[in-house]
Amino acid sequence: MDNSNGAPGATTTPADSARRIKEAASHVIDRGREAAMQRVHEGAERARSSAQNTTSALRRAAADIEPDTPLLGSGLKRAADWLEEAAGHLGQGDLNRVVDNLNTFARRNPALFLGASLAAGFLIARLGKAAIESTVDHGLPSGEYSPGLTTDGTPGL
């Protein structure tokens, strides 16, 4: 008598074992896919937020530069418009469209793309430097850094 319901003493056919393994593998793959998509969405949200900050900085730079250099100011505005559109696509989770738009923008406006990339790099570097300096300077007068002291002013080991 073949009883493959999982009861003690029951025999299991190879087809039942294969089905169970396939179901378990499918379940693990589904959970992995869900976790990966969650991470992608979290990363996209962080990128969207960063893009919005960069867009604001580009618009401020364009406003400052435009009176003296209208062509550069106009280019920065276009870069900000593109970045804003890309951030909207990121917010919708359409990563393929963002990459396609980036490629199209870079092909159509290589000098502007390079300039915007450099500006974004300088902005990110400046923000990083400011964050590091505020961490290092915490609690020390006039920005002095003493490697022998901890952040609360006590001697370090």
Image (cartoon, grey):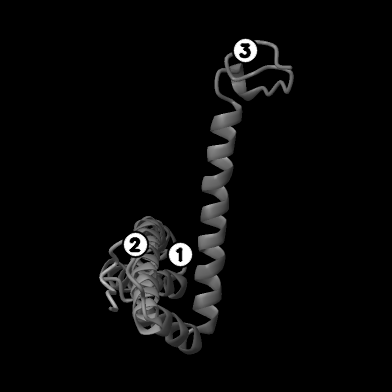
Name the element at disc 1: loop
Residue at which label 3 appears: 153
Picture coordinates of residue 140, whole percent (x, y)? 60, 18
**Mark 2 and mark 1: Cα distance apart in space:** 46 Å
Left or right relative to 27: residue 61:
right
Name the element at disc 3: loop
Q: Residue at x 50, y 69 (%)?
A: 116
Picture coordinates of residue 87, whole percent (x, y)? 33, 67
**Mark 3 and mark 2: Cα distance apart in space:** 42 Å
Left or right relative to 135: residue 49:
left
Mark 2 or mark 1, whichever is nearer to me: 2
Picture coordinates of residue 119, whole percent (x, y)? 52, 63
Name the element at disc 2: helix
Q: Residue at x 43, y 83 (%)?
A: 105
Mark 3 or mark 1, whichever is nearer to me: 3
Residue at which label 1 appears: 68
Residue at which label 2 appears: 38
- Which of disc 2 and disc 3 is earlier in sequence? 2
- For the residues bearing labels 2 and 1, Cβ distance under 8 angstroms: no
Q: Residue at x 45, y 64 (%)?
A: 68
Q: Amino acid at mark 2?
A: Gln
Splitting the image into 4 quarters, where does residue 114 fall?
A: bottom right
Left or right relative to 83: residue 124:
right
Foreground pick, 145 / 1: 1
**Mark 3 and mark 1: Cα distance apart in space:** 48 Å
